[in-house]
Image: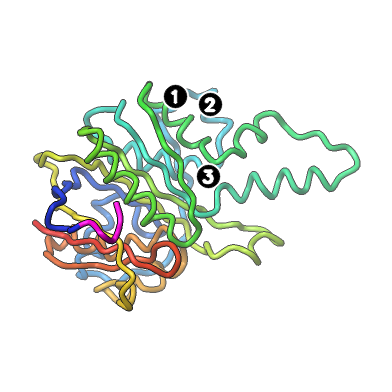
C-alpha cells in the first residue's frame, strides 16, 4: 500500500472489539468516559496484570511487558482465539534488555535461558499462541516512533490480502531503572488491541481506510486535551486520537506519524 493508491478504491476495514490498557484506563469500560471527553485523564500507578489464559507455568516466566500485550489481546479477542495476529512495539522489553546487559557486565556471565528466550521481539506473540491455543500466523513489528502506524498498516493489509480477520496488538512498557530509562521515550505503559475485519460485527466501533501521505499535515492530537500528555509518553499512545474517534463515533480524518517524516492518513467512518 503506497501513496499512489487511490484511497477511494480501498475497501473499508471494520474495527470490531476494542481494548486499551494504560494508567487509569484499564479496559474499555473504565477508559470510555475519558476517551469520550466526559472525564479528564490523570496518571496513576499501573496495576500488576495477570493473564488468566496463560497456564501457570508460563505465567511465572513472563515480564510486565508481555503481560501488557496478553491483557489487551485477550480483552479484544472475544470470539476466535486463533486469528491471524500482528504485534507492534517500538522498544521491546526494557526489563529483559537491562537484565541481560547487567549479566554480561559481570565476571560470571550466566544468562538465564528463560530471560534469553524472552528477549526476542516476538516473545509476546509466542506466549499469545500458547495462551490462545492458536496455530495461526503472527507478525511482530518495530519501527520506533511509528510502530503503531506500521503495525496498523500491516494488519489492515493482511485483512485486505488474506480476506481474513486479524487481531492487532500494540504495546510498550517503560524502563523503570537507569541507565536505560535515559534512552527511552516510554514513560507510561500503554497498549491497545482490536480485531480488524472486512465484515461489521455487533461489537463494531467504526471503519477505517488507510493511505500514506507526504503532505505537511501535523500529527493528530487528542480531542480531550488531558490525554495529550499520555499520547506523548509512549509511541504506541499515538493511537489515542483514533481511539477517541472510534469511541465518539466520529467521522474524521487523522494523521499519525509514519516512516521518513511521512504520515499515515486514516479516514474514520461510521
Q: How crowded is mark 2: few (under 14 residues within 10 Å), some or many (20 or more)?
A: few
Tell me the CA gap for discs 3 and 1. Answer: 17 Å
In this rendering, is residue 206 above or below 16? below
Chain part drawn in magenta: 1-5
Element under disc 1: helix
Find residue 73 and report its horizontal and vertical position in percent: 35, 39
Whether tag 2 and tag 1 are in contact, CB under 8 A, the answer is: yes
Q: Which of marks 3 and 2 is nearer the N terminus?
A: 2
Find residue 234 and report its horizontal and vertical position in percent: 46, 62
Find residue 203 and report its horizontal and vertical position in percent: 14, 43
Q: Nearer the viewer, mark 3 or mark 1?
A: 1
Q: Which one is nearer the viewer's eye here, 75 or 46?
A: 75
Task: Please check the rendered image and state whether residue 135 is part of the magenta-colored stretch, yes or no.
Answer: no
Would residue 173 be found to the left or right of residue 42 on screen?
right
| Res. 243 image quadrant | bottom left
Residue at point 65% right, 30% down? 114
Colour scheme in use: rainbow
| Residue placed under numbered mark 3 in the picture | 64
| Residue placed under numbered mark 2 in the picture | 58
| Residue placed under numbered mark 1 in the picture | 130
Task: Please check the rendered image and state whether residue 2 is part of the magenta-colored stretch, yes or no.
Answer: yes
Would residue 31 be found to the left or right of residue 126 on screen?
left
Amino acid at each position: 500500500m503506497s501513496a499512489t493508491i487511490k484511497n477511494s478504491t480501498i475497501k473499508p476495514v471494520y474495527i470490531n472489539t476494542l481494548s486499551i490498557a494504560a494508567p487509569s484506563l484499564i479496559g474499555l469500560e473504565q477508559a470510555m468516559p475519558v476517551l469520550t471527553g466526559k472525564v479528564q485523564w490523570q496518571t496513576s500507578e499501573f496495576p500488576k496484570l495477570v493473564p488468566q489464559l496463560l497456564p501457570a507455568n508460563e505465567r511465572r516466566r513472563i515480564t510486565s511487558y508481555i503481560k501488557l500485550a496478553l491483557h489487551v489481546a485477550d480483552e479484544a479477542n472475544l470470539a476466535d482465539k486463533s486469528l491471524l495476529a500482528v504485534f507492534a512495539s517500538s522498544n521491546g522489553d526494557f526489563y529483559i534488555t537491562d537484565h541481560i546487559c547487567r549479566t554480561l557486565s559481570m565476571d560470571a556471565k550466566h544468562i538465564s535461558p528463560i530471560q534469553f528466550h524472552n528477549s526476542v521481539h516476538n516473545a509476546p506473540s509466542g506466549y499469545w499462541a500458547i495462551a490462545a491455543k492458536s496455530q495461526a500466523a503472527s507478525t511482530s513489528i518495530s519501527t520506533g516512533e511509528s510502530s503503531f502506524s506500521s503495525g496498523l498498516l500491516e494488519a489492515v493489509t493482511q485483512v485486505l490480502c488474506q480476506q481474513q480477520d486479524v487481531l492487532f496488538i500494540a504495546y510498550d512498557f517503560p524502563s523503570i531503572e537507569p541507565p536505560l530509562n535515559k534512552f527511552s521515550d516510554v514513560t507510561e505503559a500503554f497498549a491497545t488491541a482490536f480485531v480488524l475485519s472486512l465484515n461489521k460485527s455487533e461489537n463494531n466501533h467504526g471503519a477505517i481506510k488507510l493511505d500514506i501521505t507526504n503532505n505537511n499535515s501535523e500529527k493528530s492530537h487528542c480531542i480531550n486535551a488531558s490525554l495529550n500528555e499520555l499520547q506523548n509518553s509512549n509511541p504506541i499512545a499515538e493511537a489515542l486520537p483514533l481511539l477517541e474517534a472510534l469511541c465518539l463515533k466520529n467521522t474524521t480524518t487523522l494523521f499519525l506519524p509514519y516512516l521518513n517524516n511521512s504520515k499515515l492518513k486514516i479516514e474514520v467512518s461510521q
